[in-house]
Image: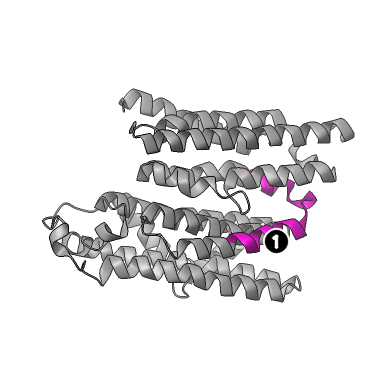
Amino acid sequence: MNPQAKLVFVSSLLLGTTITISSNHWIMAWAGLEINTLAILPLISKSHHPRAIEAATKYFLVQAAASTLVLFSSLINAWYTGQWDITQLTHPTSSLILTSAIAIKLGLVPFHFWFPEVLQGSPLTTGLLLSTIMKFPPITLLYMTSPSLNPTLLTTMAIMSTALGGWMGLNQTQVRKILAFSSISHLGWMAVILVYDPKLTLMNFYLYSMMTAAVFLTLNSMKVLKLSTLMTTWAKTPSLSAMLLLTLLSLAGLPPLTGFLPKWLIIQELTKQDMAPTATIMALLSLLGLFFYLRLAYCATITLPPHTTNHMKAWRITKPTNTMIAILTTMSLTLLPISPMIFSSI
């Protein structure tokens, strides 16, 4: 892709995100979401492969439907209350339609079907944008409207997302699809706590974005798209593979690592809200995610492929690791000890 064109698309992406997260008026928020959608489409379809074109088409149709619903919910609210302010979404029907619209935009169950397909058709760098930056504007809209959302609906969708994200990721061999189901599962954790402690949802999103960025950039550096390729990476980049193992365990939420922090805080807050059964179910369902993260980690560091003749063995790479990967990986592993400072900042 032409560097100037790429610069325009990435700038538009940042502009759309900024407009949505800084707006108070529904029409401005909607315009930002539309700019975002139009800016990411060329980045999804840049390889001109039929699968990439299909992914871009699916993404456009789904996001257009979701944006229409956002506009529709704000119109109903304005009709009944005379308010276009995002924080004044008080009409119950509007809240219901908005929750559905944002769930479609994010890929929460039961509106999750498009997300693994679109991620599978996109390059890894675009997949990273879809999993992190593109989720930020919808989550900020949920954050701003959180007092008027339906807690029962969100909790149900959250439990379903964590369950399906875990179950459907178990059987995958494509790395991008595994990461898509991982994203759906993490969104479940964000949605469950949204009404009770919205700041915790945002903190969870920031930490998830950081860990996912580390995994995507590492995989992109290794040129890995499926598990059978991942099995040969230890021979090429042993240190990077070892770091990938730890980052995946952090994403799974194992205690000494950063990923444990949001899960611990969410379970603690749910228990305070007398929702111990929900907290127990969420904790048990996260074991499904742990299984496929361990599977990825196992393929990355412990196994060699059974049929080595089918794979081209690459020379060990001596070039230095990308600085961004180093920073993100370090933060993905070591933020738990400074959690009191994170608490005081939120």
Q: Residue furthest right?
A: 80
Q: Residue at x 52, y 42 (%)?
A: 134
- Residue 343: where, in percent of width, then height? 59, 64
Q: Is residue 154 above or below residue 134?
A: below
* Colour option used: one colour
Q: Quadrant of residue 346?
A: bottom right
In reply to whether residue 346 is colored magenta, the answer given is no
Residue displayed at 55% across by 45% down: 135
Camera-side residue of 64 and 145: 64
Quadrant where the N terminus is found in the figure: top left
Q: Nearer the viewer, residue 260 or 221?
A: 221
Residue 139 image offset from top left, x and y in percent: 62, 47
Q: Which residue is mark 1?
A: 156
Task: In the rendered view, tell whether residue 46 sits above or below residue 286.
Answer: above
35 lies left or right of 215:
right
Q: Name the one closer to the observer, 316 or 17.
A: 316
